[in-house]
Image (cartoon, rainbow, N blue to C red):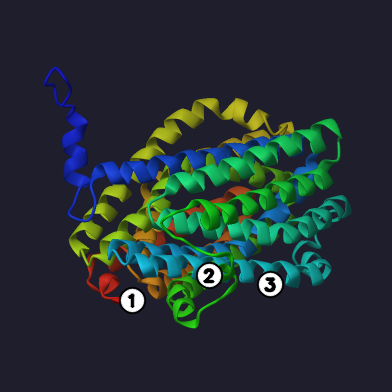
Amino acid sequence: MNKLGIRWPGRALLEKHLTGKSMDHRQITNLFFPILIDQAFIVVIFLINTAMISSSGVAAISAVSTVDSLNIFLINAFVAVATGGTVIVAQYKGSRNEAMVAKAAAGTVATVSLLSLGIGLLLLVFSNPVLDLLFGAASSDVLAQAKHYFIGSCISFLGIGIVQAVSGVMRGIGKSRVSLILSLIMNLLFVGSNVVFISLLDMGVNGLTIAMNVARYTAAICAITYIVKLDASLRLRLRELLLVRWTMLKKIMYIGVPFAAEQMFFNGGKLMTQVFIVSLGTGAIAANAIGNTIAMLSQIPAGALSLTLVTVVGQCMGQRNVEDARKFIKAFVVLSSLSLVLATVIILPLFGPLAGLFHPPAEIMHELYWLTLINLIAQIPLWSFSFILPAGLRAAGDAKFTSISSMLSMWVVRIVLGYVLGITLGMGIIGVWLAMNLEWGVRGALFAWRFRGPKWYAHRLIETEK
């Protein structure tokens, strides 16, 4: 109600659907908006960087797109473990056990850092056979640039791992503004470095890898400095970030391992579809890269809601308030679907200018338009059930069911159907994307069925500890 005594009509809806005993709509919106800005910034920066590298030619954008499919597969393994840490931190925060919040935070950073370092070193050793195995069908020009980019990406894994771990911890305790600031530091530096190394020095893919490492390790240094020197609530010491305590590791891994396995299998499935796409030619690779970027743009608010829900439900379950958790999950599914409607209305009229940022060959524009149109329409009823619901279930501790469901639907539906539609029936890249949309529907139906029952909230991840 304002000074004139007029009550804003949306206030009643917020109080009805986004306010409970665990937290109110002000806490949720304060958590959501920094994450929204963060996600918007990440996607816009990705769009700008993709547009810049596309100026180096179709081979360059194809190489970066090809390796990024593998990068997402690898990075999501330790991002998943960081998400496990977010859930544990959020539940301890909800239970108001500040001592265990600090221990969970230290355990998350130590575990994710060690894991990201290990993955990076392992892939550096086996970079050539991995790329030859997965992308040997690509042209020699694409493959050569892909190898340079992949090596640079592996070197940067420790930096991005530290940033993701600290950001996850900050979201878990409700300080999403810190994760936003870290993201701004990393991504602004990334863009600035790309301007220097790609646009000014014309270093192409090599310039992109240098910029990536400068940005990620600078942000990692800032992240460690913040939690050791500046955050008064955690009171962490540097040596605590170098220790992995077994009891805390088990809690984090209870959520993190199933989610990591899900991400590995899920993104492994996406890699398989990438192999299909590579076999369709460089034009299909470019169309897939541009289509993915436009899809990411449309999913910015929905993705931010998914990240926010992990903290919201985690804190609700820390207080064992299932009623609030259920209400908030339902509200977030609706909000996510509405955001996708709005994104479709905005993006479709702007398709031409958006696609033009990537300098696509004229011959792929027609196919790219239909791919974008079908995906934008399909995601409105399907995406939220497929991605928002499992975020809520996982935050309640129901990690195994969400992971197994995602893995099965990916490999049984998306891979098989993608090959049948895209390759066997000759529908090309559109067939591969149609299979993805149908897989969302199958997966979302499984999560909706789980959500109706009592098993998703029967898990107890934390107990009263001192």
Looking at the image, is mark 1 or mark 3 earlier in the sequence?
3
Residue extending farthest to the top is: 4
Looking at the rendering, which quadrant does residue 452 occupy?
A: bottom left
Query: Which mark identifies residue 118?
Result: 3
Give the residue type that dot 2 points to: Ala
Looking at the rendering, which quadrant does residue 190 occupy?
A: top right
Kind of element beneath mark 1: loop
The residue tagged 1 is 466
Mark nearest the camera among 3 and 2 is 3
**Is residue 378 in view?**
no
Q: Residue at x 71, y 57 (%)?
A: 156
Q: Taking 117 as reference, is 374 above or below it? A: above
Report whether 90 appears left or right of 296.
left
**Is residue 223 in view?**
yes
Instruction: Find the distance from the CA under tag 3 to the CA under tag 2.
Output: 15 Å
Circles 2 and 1: CB atoms closer than 8 Å = no
Instruction: Find the distance from the CA under tag 1 to the CA under tag 3.
Output: 32 Å
Residue 144, percent across and down?
87, 55
Give the residue type that dot 3 points to: Gly
Q: Residue at x 54, y 58 (%)?
A: 228
Looking at the rendering, which quadrant does residue 361 occupy?
A: top right
The residue tagged 2 is 260
Residue extending farthest to the left is: 5
Q: Which residue is more in the foreground, 232 or 42?
A: 232
Q: Taking 428 as reference, is 204 above or below it? A: above
Kind of element beneath mark 3: helix
Mark nearest the camera among 1 and 3 is 1
Give the residue type that dot 1 points to: Lys
Binning the other alpha carbons within 10 Å of mark 1 as few (below 14), some (14 to 19) or many (20 upward) gives few
Residue 87, percent across and down?
40, 64
